[in-house]
Amino acid sequence: MLWACVLLPRLALDDVLRRRPPSDEPLVLVGGPANARIVVAANRFAQAAGIYRGQRLSAAQALLNHFDTVEYDPAATARAHRFLAAWAYGYSSDVALLPHAVVLEVSKSRNLFGPWCDFETTLREGLVEQGFHHRVALAPNAHAAHVLAGVRDGLAVTTTDELRRTLAPIPVQRARLPGGVADALASMGVRTLGQLMQLPRAGVQRRFGAGLIDHLDELTGDAPAQLESFRPPDSLDLRMEWSHEVEHSGALVFPLRRLTGDLAAYLAGRDGGVQRFVVELEHRTGEPTRMPIGLLAAERDARLLFDCARERLERQALPSSVVAMRLVASELPPFVPAGRDLFDTRPANAMPLDQLRGRLLARLGEKAIYRLGRTVDPRPEHAQAREPTAVVPVPEPSPRPTWLLDKPVPLYGETLTILAGPERLETGWWDSGDMRRDYYVARTAQGQRAWVYRAPDAPGRWMLHGWFA
């Protein structure tokens, strides 16, 4: 087996920055008690001013007069961690969470994504697109890959013998040993993993417990790694909050694009789609504004999801300023890619009909898009009714025209070629709308397909009742 580790050294900060428009202003994540606030993370502009992780907030304010501060939210960081695990699920069915990292088994996935050099490039491109800084390493087991990713980015070890040689010079402080073992070992003169592995196992166990021995066995592959497999949930709840108030819908486009992009990445990871989701705009006071987004079929294209949501947002009046945006997708049906004929003559960038109808549905509303369905009344004037697009159409037992005239009109001077018929309709006696007609599908001299019948008062004259597309 081969495991890839995606180490996320700036997970909390990246999760904040990717949800904000690009800016060159200093930004600091702060945490800790009110009387001892410290810097949890700082962007590169704040670091250039001398602000660093673990620094007292008062000291940072003495170095820089003005910088934006964001409260560190461990729950939001955990959600971002799980989101990346769901994204990684699209590359492997064996995914697990480790501290500040996601590990995935890739030996089987290389048949699909190619050799490791190409697979690694694909992973890195996806992480850059999602907005996360990362370090990637490959090793025969997950814990070793976790350690190697912290030592050197891009390191790839594929055999057990090579892994032992690579682990040997690694300092114990960087080997992710349990508890405070690393400092105790360093004080004893044991500074590398190679020196530690040469010590008698019985003595190491008596001094530091069985946990250290188990950890070393997992690093070298002598014992199976104890990992809890990650499975993406069947629903998704995303949220973005900002410190200022947004009063115009135009300023909500950026967070909407990010949320729908995250939704598309999540759906691709679990190989699913979404047909209906809800965007909520939260206000300082009052109930949130709900915007349901409906599609005609399950989709997962990021651009399509964003366009449909933006169309709905542009039609939404804001009752008050917005302080947060939430996206909830509680139903994630399977995704079936749309097929296309091999000899399709449409341009490559032509929009499929279902996507066009989905965008019209988002822009105009559910009541504006409908299809014609049939009723139980066989009379042509009453046989059709409007149905929602979500209703599966019932096949017509006999052909019916797409364009049905309100009233039949005489058809003069036309030479008709009968294509189908007659179809006798004799009904309507119960409501004084009695009719007896024999309908035909006919082609005119101009090549049009018409739905006609003989006039009862003039047997030699045709009456036109509709046109076929």
Image: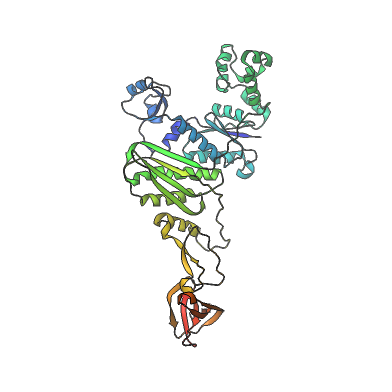
Residue 97 placement: quadrant: top right
- x then y, percent, for residue 38: 40, 22
Residue at the spot x=60%, y=43% of the render? 113
> Relative to residue 234, is residue 405 drawn left or right?
left
Specify the color scheme: rainbow
Question: Taking the image as drawn, is residue 19 in sight?
Answer: no
Vertical relation: 10 (above or below) 125: above
- x then y, percent, for residue 184: 57, 13
- x then y, percent, for residue 333: 54, 49
Vertical relation: 285 (above or below) 410: above
Residue at the spot x=35%, y=33% of the render? 25
* Residue closest to the eye, 26 or 208: 208
* Residue closest to the eye, 6 or 282: 282
Residue 366 placement: quadrant: bottom left
* Quarter of the image where the N terminus is located: top right
Farthest residue in the top direction?
188
